[in-house]
């Protein structure tokens, strides 16, 4: 009888230990699941932040490009010798000025802080243009406009496809055809200047 009692006591102890081990294991499983859930939430937040960063990057690039078009256009309105170049420059000031205002309004509603000055690349181009005069200025300005509009068109096409914010996506989609038209015009002017 004592043997049966000991056997039952040992079996009961083993059962209790096994149960404790299972609940510790379940506790570990739950905390691992929580960590995984928290990690996936973090990944989603990171993805959302990355998408928002992509839209902000688009807005910043578009703002700097637009400011450069206006600044270079104002300079060309004063310095250009060719009437087609002067007319194109006036169109740049008008069209890109309008687009800049639209972008500023969208950015303000999204709490996106846009740059207020040209970046280093555009400042260098501005200085190079300021140092030129006559036909040399006209050709340099036109070349910068061709390069700038090629990059801006690519930016707008990318933004119209990949921006997650509906207003920024619409801005890019609407600006794309205008930029393409500018590019066609400046390429014609470039071929006429040769």
Image (cartoon, rainbow, N blue to C red):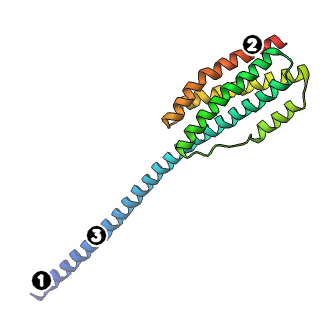
Classed neighbour count for the residue bearing mark 1: other residues with Cα under 10 Å, few (<14), some (14–19), many (≥20) = few
Q: Disc 1 designates what residue?
A: 4
- Which-is-in-front pick, marks 3 and 1? 3
Closer-to-camera residue (72/26): 72
Give the residue drawn at x 63%, y 29%: 98
Dot 3: element: helix
Q: Position of residue 5 (x, y in %)?
A: 13, 85
Q: CA distance from mark 2 to mark 1?
A: 104 Å
Please tell me which residue is depicted at 16% across the width and 81% down the height of the picture: 7
Q: Are marks 3 and 1 in contact (CB under 8 Å)?
A: no
Q: Which residue is mark 3?
A: 23
Residue sitting nearer the eye, 32 or 135: 135
Residue 97 location, quadrant: top right
Instruction: Give the CA separation, mark 3 to mark 1.
Output: 28 Å
Dot 1: element: helix
- Find the distance from the CA under tag 3 to the CA under tag 2: 78 Å
As drawn, is 26 to the left or to the right of 82?
Answer: left
The answer to whether residue 8 is above or below residue 103 is below
State which quadrant residue 123 falls in: top right
Do residues under tags 2 and 1 come within 8 Å of each other at their CB atoms? no
Q: Position of residue 4 (x, y in %)?
A: 12, 83
Up the image or down, 13 lies above or below 144; here it is below
Q: Determine whether label 3 and label 2 are within 8 Å by CB.
A: no
Check disc 2 and report the residue beneath it.
Answer: 188
| Mark before the other along the chain sequence, 3 or 2 | 3
Residue 114 badge: none
């Amino acid at each position: 009888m004592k043997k049966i009692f000991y056997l039952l006591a040992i079996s009961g102890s083993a059962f209790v230990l096994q149960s404790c081990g299972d609940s510790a294991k379940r506790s570990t499983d739950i905390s691992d699941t929580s960590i995984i859930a928290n990690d996936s939430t973090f990944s989603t937040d990171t993805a959302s932040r990355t998408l928002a960063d992509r839209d902000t990057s688009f807005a910043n690039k578009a703002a700097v490009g637009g400011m450069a078009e206006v600044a270079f256009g104002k300079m060309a309105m004063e310095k250009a010798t060719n009437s087609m170049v002067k007319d194109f420059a006036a169109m740049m000031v008008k069209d890109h000025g309008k687009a800049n205002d639209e972008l500023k309004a969208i950015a303000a509603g999204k709490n996106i802080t846009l740059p207020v000055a040209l970046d280093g690349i555009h400042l260098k181009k501005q200085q190079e243009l300021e140092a030129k005069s006559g036909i040399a200025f006209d050709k340099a300005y036109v070349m910068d406009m061709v390069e700038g509009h090629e990059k801006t068109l690519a930016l707008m096409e990318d933004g119209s496809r990949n921006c997650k914010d509906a207003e920024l996506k619409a801005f890019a989609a609407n600006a794309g055809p205008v930029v393409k038209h500018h590019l066609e015009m400046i390429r014609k002017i470039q071929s006429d200047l040769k």
